[in-house]
Amino acid sequence: MREIFYPNSVAVIGVSTSSDNMGRGIVFNLTEFGFQGIIYQVGPKGGVFAGRRIYKSVLDIPDHLDLAVILTPARTVPAILEECGQKRIQWAVVESAGFREFGEAGKKIEEEIIRVAAKYNLRFVGPNCIGVINMENGLCTPFPPLRRIVRHGDISMISQSGGVGMSVLNLMGNEGLGLNKFVSAGNMLNIQTEELLSYFIEDPGTKYILLYLEGIQDGRKLMEVASRSTKPIVAFKANIGQFGKAIASSHTASLSSNDKVVDAAFRQCGIIRVHDATTLGNDLKILRLPAMRGKNLAIISRSGGHAVIAADACEMSGFSLAPFPREFLEEVESHFRASVIKLTNPLDLGDLFDLDIYLKIIDRTLAQKGVDGIVFLHTFNAMMEGQKSRDLFLQVIELSKKYDKPVALYVSTEDQEVNYLKRNLNYPVFTQVVETVRALGLNRRYHGEMLRIRQPKEILSFQVDEKTARYLLEKPHLEKRDLLLHEAAEVLSIYGIPMVRGAPVPDEKEAIKAAKDLGFPVAMKVISKEISHKSDVGGVQLNLRSEVGVADAYQDMTRRIRQAYPEAKIEGVLIQPMVTGGRELIVGGRQDEQFGPVVMVGLGGIFVEIFGEVSVRVAPISRGEALEMIDELRCSAIFKGARGMKPSDLEAVAEVLLRLSQLLCDLPEIREIDINPLRVFQEKEGCLALDVRMILGKD
Amino acid sequence: MREIFYPNSVAVIGVSTSSDNMGRGIVFNLTEFGFQGIIYQVGPKGGVFAGRRIYKSVLDIPDHLDLAVILTPARTVPAILEECGQKRIQWAVVESAGFREFGEAGKKIEEEIIRVAAKYNLRFVGPNCIGVINMENGLCTPFPPLRRIVRHGDISMISQSGGVGMSVLNLMGNEGLGLNKFVSAGNMLNIQTEELLSYFIEDPGTKYILLYLEGIQDGRKLMEVASRSTKPIVAFKANIGQFGKAIASSHTASLSSNDKVVDAAFRQCGIIRVHDATTLGNDLKILRLPAMRGKNLAIISRSGGHAVIAADACEMSGFSLAPFPREFLEEVESHFRASVIKLTNPLDLGDLFDLDIYLKIIDRTLAQKGVDGIVFLHTFNAMMEGQKSRDLFLQVIELSKKYDKPVALYVSTEDQEVNYLKRNLNYPVFTQVVETVRALGLNRRYHGEMLRIRQPKEILSFQVDEKTARYLLEKPHLEKRDLLLHEAAEVLSIYGIPMVRGAPVPDEKEAIKAAKDLGFPVAMKVISKEISHKSDVGGVQLNLRSEVGVADAYQDMTRRIRQAYPEAKIEGVLIQPMVTGGRELIVGGRQDEQFGPVVMVGLGGIFVEIFGEVSVRVAPISRGEALEMIDELRCSAIFKGARGMKPSDLEAVAEVLLRLSQLLCDLPEIREIDINPLRVFQEKEGCLALDVRMILGKD
């Protein structure tokens, strides 16, 4: 893929002498950015532009071509690619629009392009994109004329929208962040996001990677590629709403929306997700600082008000404002005009006007073992203190390097001075206090998680009779229906997931007999191919304490179901002993379109969907991940024994998640599994599935 | 207070000929901002500065003085104020620092200042502030030398931090927002925030009010003043963490933190609260647009990617992307190059390059009845389309006025052009898509809530025997203890709040007798002055089904309490019948230090504190507010009958809240009330307090 970014010669195809020709914009940009290779121009009408001949076809060019950049009407692209193939051009950027995004005709042209490219083994970016930029050699192929708004740097970006890509370049320019390479990926007919990402991970000029994604084609591939990266990857994943609209047929599906899976997957492979452009810019800035290795923050501020705002934000970002040690305070007290400094953390520098003292205080603060990083809030008047402040910042930057601890720098001053600092300091400058602290929290979290992600991941494999489990799926599959309750229970049992015993029986008489055998009280659940949401139609009857109770419940259940679903055939009922004690969770999983099998755990009960108290992971998961999933639930404190409760057996829950993870990976035919509730008993006493649903893929 | 902002003559006290004298900064600013009155300089050493005499005392000035601005060492301030008093100066701004913020000595000086000011009826802002600005007449008294970074406009600000105030002025300057007046309130020894707010509400030059608050002295007063305002008030309230640290002695206290009360109070009186500077700027911008009167938003975007991001944000902000009507689409189709526009909402203008067509589309979109507002996302190249885009914006602004509907404008272009637009368009310009949509959501919410707040508020008053209730508090008050369970139950009963019957009995024998009378099963709860968290020590025993059960429970309870609290005296137990059915809420209230009585309702059960599922209001509340409190709980859907549940009697809950509101207003001696749980039955079947705690104020 190197040729796309480092071509020695480029053919710009779609140039004419007409003044509204857009291909000329590409030539303009290549010139403006100082492209170091040879530029050829191609257009069917020929002529001359910018002192260069316009060739009628690439075939007429008497030179080898590394890259073709095509911006011609969609219908002409297949023939042009054919000529490129004949000319042995191996790499192309197709910027033309008018393909699948405008209906059937466009889709047909796409198919043809794919065919031609395959024939010549020609690889291309696009179509429907704005092109490629490489700041190292001045390759700049977008057609809208650009100025050099962004400086040369070490951040590379892949954008699935040209417009958003351009906005981000504006933002980077304003923030003083340097660009290395940029690709607008377009319709991704040939070269995909994952392949570009893989290139940037290896690319020596790229140190930070930025993604703007509207869709994910191969989630597993993306995770696999991203996991290999030692470079931070920040992704803005949009197009959330569309996903949300998919109809959910089970709790698991509604609780583990595609967007939640994206969150989980990104976290599992170390991609930092952002939801807006400001956060994106600030995250890119904060990652350039040394790692914040602990939670002990020192706030040093010139204004008391800013210190107050920063301290508020600390609580939200999980930082501690560790009190400064005695000796440090004594040092400050003896050396500086301590009478105007309040000797606490946040350290309000108050009316101290000597910036040299600021520097000494920052130095002594960074030197402390109990301090992992500093937020330095500096408000100044550019007219009076501009130069002194610039000097101070340069020295603070050196201190941050020397101690290998982050100093997040917030400045409040006139905007011209802010812009100067952003463009010239080569160090992140923040202009919003809350964001400064939040971003530093991201720095800490990122470095912590990367340590964890780089650990080799151990996936346990349980001995199970996968063959029998698969055999159990055959009949439902043939009958194009989901698993009946007792069938699903059997699959669980094969995978070693404990479920309450139960006897499937065909009628009322057998139900009473089974209840006597199991011992009262019992629960009764309907078995019917047509009924999936049993409890909504009285299909679950609990706490039946006698033979009469069972008989009445059976009658009531069949009557209500006949009313609600006249066409439903009742195959029988499942009789289970009532289980007392414990707390309820919901666990489950499903096959995600982008990421494959995912597992989920959440708080059970009727409020589950309201509080959205679930955690999700892409399977397979390690034991550590299973425990982490449980930890993530805010309600886990209760399960762990907060407020005088007896601790629950969360080890057993973790094991259920691991077995479920294996089940979903082994049997992708199962589209969704809902274990609801999973009753969790006290420590060492295990857990028990009380009900389960398994939905098969319908293809 | 007009004199503070419109003085004809100002004495700057604290000016010297020394080059590091800070008082000179004040004179510099008055000159720089073109102050239209007469400037006098005062300093003990006399001399000349800036072509003006430095008087040794205000008493030497041969002229009447409207305003004194004082910046001298703290210890000199009382004597200076004394002279001001003698000179009959009625208004002052004391900028000097070194008062209570630096300990006891400073506090003593403050007391003296208060005394002198009272003697002469002299009113003053400060001390420990950076002064006052009025852009109308060039009054600019801060001491740090300022440039005219902010233009003259209609926004006035009160800031409890000088540093944060200056940062906000920088922000306003950058965003092109115009300032009318600014006050740094400092230690507020004399003139308080509420009084300044009241002035700005009446001030003709002020159309929007901005507050930066670190503390609230008189919350009720603030609410009363703010409620009168027809001008939007935006408040950044910081110093949250400090509040959070107060020790909570009941669920109610921990669930209704001071910060939640601030949220509720602001909402009740129409103050818009923000938590960071960016939101503050954007909210000030969006409120300048016409009101968004419904939830139907149209997104018009030049880039598909930006449209996707905006659509995502719509879901979060509660907007609907209503489909465009047939006729509109037909019109667009027939008039414009429809082949490149996807005719949906969001409307992606795609490759349409003629900006005149954009204008026509925006016009036709605003004309539609089903559209309440537009987000227009315009990405352009300033070099190529700068002038055309400026013209387009000016016309769009006219359209927004003509149709009286908001058009929120997002631009992505080079930063110089963005700055030009912000400073010259006199119309809000946003540079972040998500923020644009969020802010428009605020516009809609604000205008909706203001309509509601302007409705006269009807407070029901229930006939209760307040005297007897107060009498019941006397004994516990004398004994310096909280109310015992049966005492609290009696107070509830006087206020008409239904509670489960119960018999307080002294010993095991009487307990058994009471249980037989009430009928099994029963609950038993300990009565003891020393035990407040009963259930933690086995002091609550439920579901006792027989005489033996009651006896065993009594023994078990007393044994466990003797172990946990050897010093506790058990006065007896309360026997209550067990109540079955219904769902649990927690209701309560407390006396807030800033805002007085507040009421609270939340989801009951063990997860209540984890999910923080509560809503709070400052009492007294109207019936509408009580219902709104319940509606605010995410779990209210379940109580209203979601997912096949029978609806609960929420009318009865609202009545409990109203009666509780009256109780807390009538009896401020009660510091906290916890009704936990309140069992709520099905519609028309009411609700019942099962347990209650009342904590008295300890003074």
Image (tube, coloured by chain):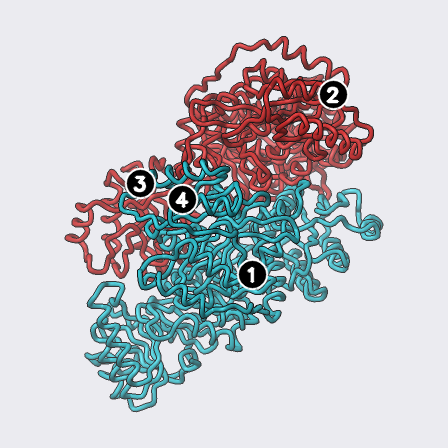
Chain colours: A cyan, B red
CA separation, marks 4 and 1? Answer: 72 Å
- Name the side, left or right, on which B507 lies relative to B442: right
Q: Is residue B9 visible?
A: no
Q: Return the disc, 1 or 3, that comes first in the chain's sequence.
A: 1
CA separation, marks 1 and 3? Answer: 59 Å
Q: Which amino acid lies under the numbered mark 4 shown in the image of this protein?
A: Lys
Query: Looking at the image, do the residues carrying marks 4 and 1 touch, with CB atoms under 8 Å apart?
Result: no
Residue B472: x percent and y percent? 67, 13
Task: Point out which mark residue A564 bears.
Answer: 3
Residue shown at 31% from the left, 74% from the top: A94
CA separation, marks 2 and 1? Answer: 69 Å
Q: Return the disc, 3 or 4, that comes first in the chain's sequence.
A: 4
Task: Point out which mark residue A285 bears.
Answer: 1
CA separation, marks 2 and 3? Answer: 54 Å
Q: In which quarter of the image is residue A560?
A: top left
Q: Quadrant of residue B470?
A: top right
> B293 or A11: which is nearer to us?
B293
Reading the image, the residue beneath label 2 is B507
Same-chain check, marks 1 and 3? yes
> B580 or A598: which is nearer to us?
B580
For disc 3, the chain is: A
Q: Which amino acid lies under the numbered mark 3 shown in the image of this protein?
A: Ala
> A89 or A645: which is nearer to us?
A645
Task: Point out which mark residue A509 bears.
Answer: 4
Query: Local crowd at mark 2 within 10 Å, few (<14), some, or many (≥20)?
Result: some
Same-chain check, marks 3 and 4? yes
Same-chain check, marks 2 and 3? no
For disc 1, the chain is: A
